[in-house]
Amino acid sequence: MLSHTGALMAPRSADVLHELFASRTVVEFADLQAALDDASRATTFRFLKQVTYRRSYNHNGRYYTRHDPARYDRFGLFSHQGILFSRDGSLSSTVVRLVQEAEAGQTQRELRELLRVRVQVLLLEAVRRGRIEREHVERLFVYLHTDQVVRQAQARRRKELIAAAAVEAEVTDAIVIQVLLTLLRHPGSKAADVLRYLRGHSPPIVMGHVRTVFDRYDLDELGKKGGTSSC
């Protein structure tokens, strides 16, 4: 095969793309064409089909990277210098998967912060196509699985998280001090014991407050080790 200059060219092969992806984390389409001896777009795409790759879901899909399952984080995402990739390939599929996998569903804000791009249009389109559901949960729009059993479990978990957040917000420094003082006076006490000792406290301290303090400071584990220290 001769190039436009008349020089002998090596036969084009997907191997050169494998080598390019192995040597560089991220490439652009022009890099792929150059590796294939300035191949046309159609020819480059033909060879690219023989390579397992992903396009960035930001920057208008301008960048390409080798699809390596080990690269992705627990959300199936990979970032390189602000260039974002998903194991799913497309952003729409990523949004649907993240909604389906989340134990409490996902809100638009949560997905936007996680994916670092706008997702509102994709969410509404996924709902319209029946790929996910949207419900009002405690005055909050939450996107959920289409399977009824999974969806109900997600909604219940979301309500629990909202309730826990409300209790967390109510736990003042004064409440924390009262719980810790009680544990100093009664080392090794469980949450229920602390609540009993604090009965009649004004303002009232309820189990949710005590449980929050225990969780915040890992006091259950401290109790297993023999109670609080004297220092």
Image (cartoon, rainbow, N blue to C red):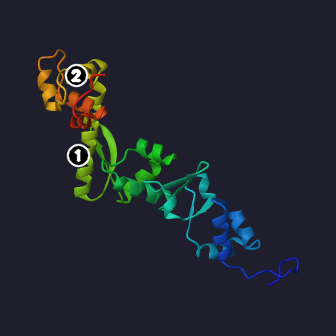
- Foreground: 187 or 52? 187
Q: Are marks 2 and 1 in contact (CB under 8 Å)?
A: no
Give me the residue at 18% from left, 30% from top. Answer: 188
Answer above or below: position of 125 versus 29. above
Q: CA distance from mark 2 to mark 1?
A: 36 Å
Give the percent coordinates (x, y) of residue 180. Answer: 25, 23
Direction right: furthest residue:
5
Direction top: furthest residue:
202
Q: Nearer the viewer, mark 2 or mark 1?
A: 2
Give the percent coordinates (x, y) of residue 61. Answer: 60, 58
- Secondary element type, mark 2: helix
State the quadrant of the N terminus.
bottom right
Answer above or below: position of 33 versus 166. below
Give me the residue at 52% from left, 55% from top. Answer: 78
- Foreground: 226 or 106? 226
**Which quarter of the figure has residue 181?**
top left
Side of 200 where 161 appears, left or right: right
Q: Earlier in the sequence, mark 2 or mark 1?
A: 1
**Which quarter of the figure has residue 56?**
bottom right
> Disc 1 marks which residue?
156
Q: Residues within 10 Å of mark 1 (few under 14, many from 20)?
A: some
Give me the residue at 34% from left, 51% from top. Answer: 102
> Disc 2 marks which residue?
184
Answer above or below: position of 67 versus 8. above
Side of 53 where 211 appears, left or right: left
Give the percent coordinates (x, y) of residue 217. Answer: 30, 32
Give the percent coordinates (x, y) of residue 158. Answer: 28, 43
- Secondary element type, mark 1: helix
Q: Amino acid at mark 1?
A: Arg
Give me the residue at 21% from left, 24% from top. Answer: 183
**Which quarter of the figure has residue 215?**
top left
